[in-house]
Image (tube, rainbow, N blue to C red):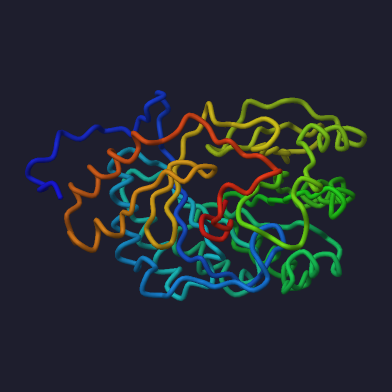
Amino acid sequence: MTDSTELPPLSNELIDPFGRKVDYLRLSVTDRCNLRCTYCMAEDMTFLPRQQILSLEELRDVASAFVELGVRKIRLTGGEPLIRRDIIKLVSAISDLPSLDEVTMTTNGMLLPKMAQPLKDAGLNRLNISIDSLRPDRFKALTRLGDLDVWHKGIRAAKAANFAKLKLNAVILAGFNDDEVLDLARYAIDNQMDISFIEEMPLGEISSHQRVNTQITSQALRDQLETEFDLTDSVETTGGPSRYVKVAGSDSKIGFISPMSNNFCDSCNRVRMTAEGRLLLCLGNEQSMDLRAVIRSHPGDSALLRAKILEALQSKPERHEFDPNRTDIVRFMNMTGG
């Protein structure tokens, strides 16, 4: 291992081999979840031993290293991040980092009734909340363990906490919930929220359905939405992969995340850290670096950690190669939070 005194001068920015600037880190804080969404994981899951998961201090050190290298947005993901017992302390520790513009989170909403206000008080800026069906029976079938009434209570709690922004995420599966696209959009607009519709990605082997049969493109969803809404393209971005349209007569926006039909790789500005400390350079590839090994073998050596992040970034691929007919990526979505 290179001694930190011999490290090359650090760049102030994370620039990959294709000239893309990385300023967004998606940080998974756990692989565990209180739901078992059919497109995300198997019903009977084996989770990582807790000692393999990064500690609060280790996660904070990783976040700090990325911020020092120019990251300005950190999204906390899972699994379900809110099942981590120290999540409020972690949000507070990361939100205190200098030069960080915002800390956001993606959650399934089940624990928001009790946790929305503490999250806001700890410094969380925005929330993305998953919702794939507004029908109680279908919601239960898609999540296997979810309760739509609890989800609605979580939305009310999040609105009462007055976050800077609330956004809904919906994964749309042909033959499962594609008949609810208009209902989901109406719900978001009626509640003054944005919503993003997401194409399903082939991550991990699942048994509930064949992904090639449930693919539906963002364009097909937009066509459906335009039967009711007047949509115009927007140049606005939140720093993620959504391509937004404006809705006439509303402040809400509708986004489309299209990894299968219209990939967003040319503007990719993000990397992901798994809960056990593996730095993933691309959601659709397996190039990675074990930063947990760096942290635990050289505790407190922030210069070495930054140097290893810079080294890893040089392996970031130009694009992913998702194919609904194949599951080339064996890890489930709960390992990276999307």
Query: Is 258 located above or below residue 57 in the figure?
Result: above
- Of residues 113 and 198, the one nearer the viewer is 198
Residue 157: x and y, percent?
65, 67
Farthest-out residue, right: 227
Query: Is 214 located above or below residue 319 in the figure?
Result: below
The answer to whether residue 63 is left or right of residue 154 is left
Q: Residue at x 77, y 43 (%)?
A: 215
Farthest-out residue, left: 5
Query: Is 167 located above or below residue 108 in the figure?
Result: above
Which picture quadrant has residue 208?
A: bottom right
The answer to whether residue 7 is left or right of residue 258 is left
Count of numbered circles in the view: 0
Residue 14: x and y, percent?
34, 34
The answer to whether residue 91 is left or right of residue 183 is left
Q: Residue at x 77, y 64 (%)?
A: 142
Q: Residue at x 7, y 44 (%)?
A: 5
- Of residues 300 and 195, the one nearer the viewer is 300
Residue 191: x and y, percent?
76, 52
Residue 316: x and y, percent?
41, 35
**Residue 196 visible (yes or no):** no
**Residue 104 visible (yes or no):** yes
- Of residues 127 and 23, the one nearer the viewer is 23
Which picture quadrant has residue 35?
A: bottom right
The answer to whether residue 160 is left or right of residue 177 is left
